[in-house]
Image: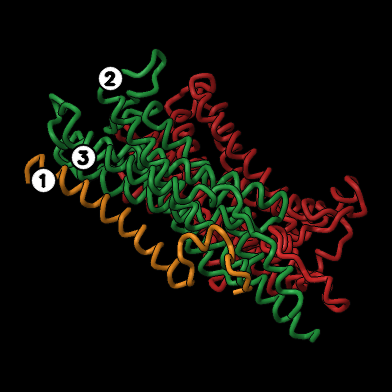
Amino acid sequence: MAGTETLAAKRFAPAGLLRWRRPLGLAAAAGMAALAVTALLLVAPDAVQGPPQRIFYIHVPSAWVGFLALAVVFVASVRYLVTGDPRHDDLASASAGLGVLFTTGVLLTGPLWARPVWGAYWVWDPRLTSFFVLWLVYLSYLALRRQVTDPVRRARYSAVLGVLGFLDVPIVYMSVNWWRGMHPEQVVITADGPRMPAAMLATLLLGLAAFTLFYLYLLAIRLGLARARRLAWATDATAADMEGTR
Amino acid sequence: MNGYGYLGAAYLAAALLYGGYLLVLRRSERAANLPPRRAASGTGDGRLR
Amino acid sequence: MTTPVTMPDVTTTPARIPVLDQATIAGPVHPRPGGRVPGGVRAGLRAAGLVAAKDLRLESRTHDAVGTVGLFALLILVTASFALPTGGPDRAGIAAGTLWMAILFASLLGIGRTQALESEEGCLDALLLAPVAREYLFLGKLAASLLFTVAVEMALVPVLLLLMQVPVGSGLALLLAALGLGTLGLVGSGCLFAVIAVRTRMRQALLPALVMPVAVPLMIASVQATGAALTGATVGANMHWLALLVGFDAMVLLVAVLAFPQLVEE
């Protein structure tokens, strides 16, 4: 048909993050490799805790990136509620899945660090309990999305959950200071700067960078999938429409 | 299990979790007939599909 | 019901081919609750009052929300007093935890039941005919549920103090603040999630599963503040808990104003 060339001549330039997908993937791979080498081999072991302390370099970045992912869910959910634009819902659901992924990572690495250092895999102290609840909240977010089939309803309901569920994050963060629990006190961000040997701090920052890049890469893939779904829908609809007018 | 055991288990668990997720994600991309570059650049050959 | 998709017009000349730009790919924007609703604030408040009055009238006939639910909460307290150590050194903390568990279960039970009734009998559809902004409907429901929950609490707290052998004394102000702010947040999130829950397959049975994880920050702050109050602590020493409660309540009300009109409009 005469029109298809006009149609195809339009380049659907990928928006925002999708364009950076390839460089993000490479950077994330490099960062993770560097982290593994540094955390496992290069940085000096902790005098008191011994080898298991190295888990810190993947445990803390997992937590931070988990919080980042959930913050993105929060902002995207608010924007969806305000504007109704389904692309914000795409971002919220993509980031929520990643949030569950990284918080699961925290829940896997944490007990394996706790057992040799504290003697127990798990304690019901305030930080761990509130973190576990956070994991449950976003699991219920995913479950709610599974249950509701209508896309408009699904987006609205999960947006409410995405906004209110985030209120647990400040609790998790502050619970270490407001109660006395077993989880180690704040050492990185204190009133007078980080209280950690420079090598450890550098490795931690490397871990944060690597995990953040990894998160962005995964997000780019998921957003690409969402976009492809919508593109398929749009072209389906357009093709069907054009069929009807032949 | 000594200290190295826990260390190895933690790093292994993380690798399986994150690596496994990445694999599953890329597999679902392939299932959607989207070679990675295509997804980002739209149709290159002038056809709708 | 979702609005039908409006595709770009293809019925005329071949030159007018629909362009697949970013916006079309994204699809139609999800419908927003309609623009200017007539009525204004006074009519809205009046509508809220009528909604609340409806719930109160229903309650006066069935005595479910306060009577049956209150009894249930009381039984939780009594059972806890057998199951948990009373009179020990940490009895204030145990009493606070038990109280809030009872309030949580009781309020979720009441709110879930009310919401289910409302949607079953088509009452909500009738309410939506009212020419007022939807937020006022939420306000009415919130007011009625608050009244019921507070009524139940007024019976629970004295019984609790008696059973758990805890004095109040100088912590009264903190106790009232914790109860007030905590109840507001709990009932607010309950009413909000109830609207979602009744529209799923599990209906109001889903309500506790939605509210309880989300309400954990609220519960933590309420229980800690109430526990402190029962040991005679002052408001000043527990400002961080009260601040958290205020923040949580503000968020719940904000989300309610933002989302409730979209949730009820089907």
> What kind of residue is marked 2?
Ala
> Residue C41: horizontal and vertical position, in percent?
88, 45
Q: In front: mark 2 or mark 1? A: 2
> What kind of residue is marked 1?
Gly
Which tint was used for chain B?
A: orange
Question: In the drawing, does residue A184 fall left or right of residue C43?
Answer: left
User: Which element carries disc 2, helix, strand or loop?
Assistant: helix
Toward the left, the furthest residue is: B2
User: Which element carries disc 1, helix, strand or loop?
Assistant: helix
Circles 3 and 2: CB distance less than 8 Å?
no
> Residue A43: horizontal and vertical position, in percent?
20, 28
Pinpoint the chain carrying mark 1. Answer: B
> Residue A143: horizontal and vertical position, in percent?
48, 64
The circle on residue C43 is none
Q: On the image, numbered disc 2 is attached to which residue?
A: A198
Question: Looking at the image, which residue is at 75% across and 56% down?
Answer: C261
N-terminal of the pair, mark 3 or mark 2, is 3
**In the rendered image of this protein, does residue A140 appear above or below residue A129?**
below
Q: Quadrant of the N terminus of chain A?
A: bottom right
Question: In the drawing, does residue A192 fall left or right of residue A224?
Answer: left
Question: In the drawing, does residue B19 fall left or right of residue C111?
Answer: left
Q: On the image, numbered disc 3 is attached to which residue?
A: A114
User: Which element carries disc 3, helix, strand or loop?
Assistant: helix
User: Marks 2 and 1: same chain?
Assistant: no
Q: Give me the chain that's red.
A: C
> What kind of residue is marked 3?
Ala
Which tint was used for chain A?
A: green
Q: On the image, numbered disc 1 is attached to which residue?
A: B5
Spatial CA distance of label 3 from label 2 is 24 Å
Circles 3 and 1: CB distance less than 8 Å?
no
Question: Looking at the image, which residue is at 28% across and 19% down?
Answer: A198
* Crowding near the residue tagged with mark 2, few <14, some 14–19, many ≥20 C-alpha atoms within 10 Å: few
